[in-house]
Image (cartoon, rainbow, N blue to C red):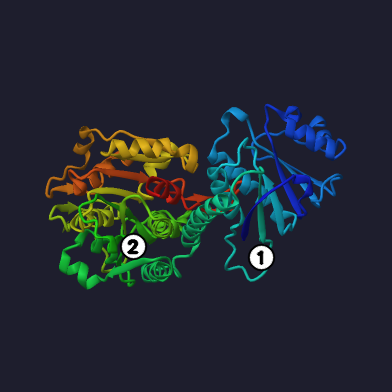
Amino acid sequence: MQIQYQTGHFEDIACDLLGFCVFEDEGSRSAGFKHLNRLTRGAAGSVLSSGELKPELHRTCLIHDPRGLKAKRLLLVGAGKKLDFTLARLRELAGTAVRRARVSNSKVIAFLPPAEDSTHEVARVCAEGALYGNYESDIYKTKDKEGKDVDCFILLGSKGVSSAGMDKSIRHGTIIGDAVNFARALGNEPGNILTPSQLAERAAKIGREVGLSVEILEREEMQKLGMNTLLAVARGSDEPPKMIILRIKRQERAHKKRAPLYALVGKGVTFDSGGISLKPGEKMEDMKADMAGGAAVVGAMVALAQLNPRQRVIGLVPTVENLPSGKATRPGDVVKSYLGKTVEIINTDAEGRLILADALAYARTLGATHLVDVATLTGACVVALGNVNAGLLGTDQEMIGRILQNRSITGEKLWQLPIDEEYRKAITSEIADIKNVGNRSGGAITAAKFLQEFVEDTPWVHMDIAGVDLDHDGRPFAAKGATGFGVRTLVQLFA
């Protein structure tokens, strides 16, 4: 999709569809809508007064051949309440306009944001939203494919605003939007195609294109290093495990060795059957997306490599397949981690924390002074927070505060959960240093406490994105499938 910034009167823009946002608590009373209504000789106002359009968030109404406009179609988009308007909501409105444009097979659309000023943030999030809305997940269909991509998205702005500055902001948004969609594409891939080897290969390929150096640790190297909790998960599969390490070449050349180093660590289980502790068959197909945390880290590093982040950042993705077989790890087995701590494996379906344990400890060996991990870690987090919020835990309260503050920009909802020391008792083992699961109580928290054992005193943030990695219903601004959750949050932290 080509994204452009253009100033001038919206009525003079020749396009297939013009998106015009209407606030629920303003309706036809705003000066902009009154002007639109005059131009269309009352057509815009009539759909409001008749109740055909209630300008609640994301609701739309399409008017064909509107008089007074050069656009072939006018799309009125409900923007919700003005008091609730944020950059995150604006991103969704841009995506909603694009999704509706796809339905009407509109190739060139113009979008008038409901913001009073044409700021650089407005341009950035509109670009992100347009790309998010234009994405489809039907890559393996041989018939009935959508084939309705929007070719050009024109962002309309006020005169007097520097086009060069807005173009830079659009490029910023395009980089992030493409990175999110790359993560979504990985999350939508079936497990027979996106194996650990394939995930490593795709990370290496896109890394070369954007300025990342990519190192892949193979099974033999991990065995020498003693990454036995990671290897325990991989034992049941014929697919070899990989450890993907991403570095920004520009930062490596800068030699800022004394500056803090932030490591982003993403869970990369390309398919999770549960291993010997086999999952129920219902919805097991969704476990192809158990690498969503890893996809988010790859996507974020791809974006950061192009955006010159403020801090030194590296990415690590331990990636495996978790299957049952005669070689698979058994419940009750004890393994020694890279850090040297012994782990009693009670449940082989609690595998994400095992691969993250070695990756987090190894990141510290690479010099990481701060850690952030992203993982579809626990069903317990879904029970606690549903499919709305991701869980947020950790010891780096300053970074947690920034993540929470950024939610109105990123649109990625997270809710902080406690991580009191009393929860540690649940994962005390009788025969090893620690066991990989506790009881049913506080499962998302005890999983985080397990990870904390391998983080030790390093400042750390954990995002449990189980429940928000996939969207089964579709939204007005997005297709069904993988969401790419986490990419925007990580990029906003460092870019």
Helix, strand or loop at label 1? It is loop
Note whether 185 is above or below 159 in the view shown: below
Q: Which of the two residues, 30 or 337, is positioned nearer the viewer here?
A: 30
Mark 1, residue position: 145
Q: Does the CB distance between marks 1 and 2 fall below 8 Å?
A: no
Q: Which of the two residues, 59 or 365, is positioned nearer the viewer here?
A: 365
Looking at the rendered structure, the kind of residue marked 1 is: Lys
Note whether 348 is above or below 393 in the view shown: below
Give the residue displayed 40% in from the left and 68% down from the top.
195
Mark 2, residue position: 250
- Marker count (numbered): 2
Whether residue 319 is visible to the viewer of this picture, yes or no, is: no
Q: Is residue 27 left or right of residue 354?
A: right
Q: How far from the left and from the top, in percent, is residue 45?
A: 81, 33
Helix, strand or loop at label 2? It is helix
Note whether 241 is above or below 334 in the view shown: below
Q: How far from the left and from the top, in percent, is residue 492?
A: 42, 46
Q: CA distance from mark 1 to mark 2?
A: 40 Å
Give the quarter of the figure containing the N terminus.
bottom right
Looking at the rendered structure, the kind of residue marked 2 is: Arg
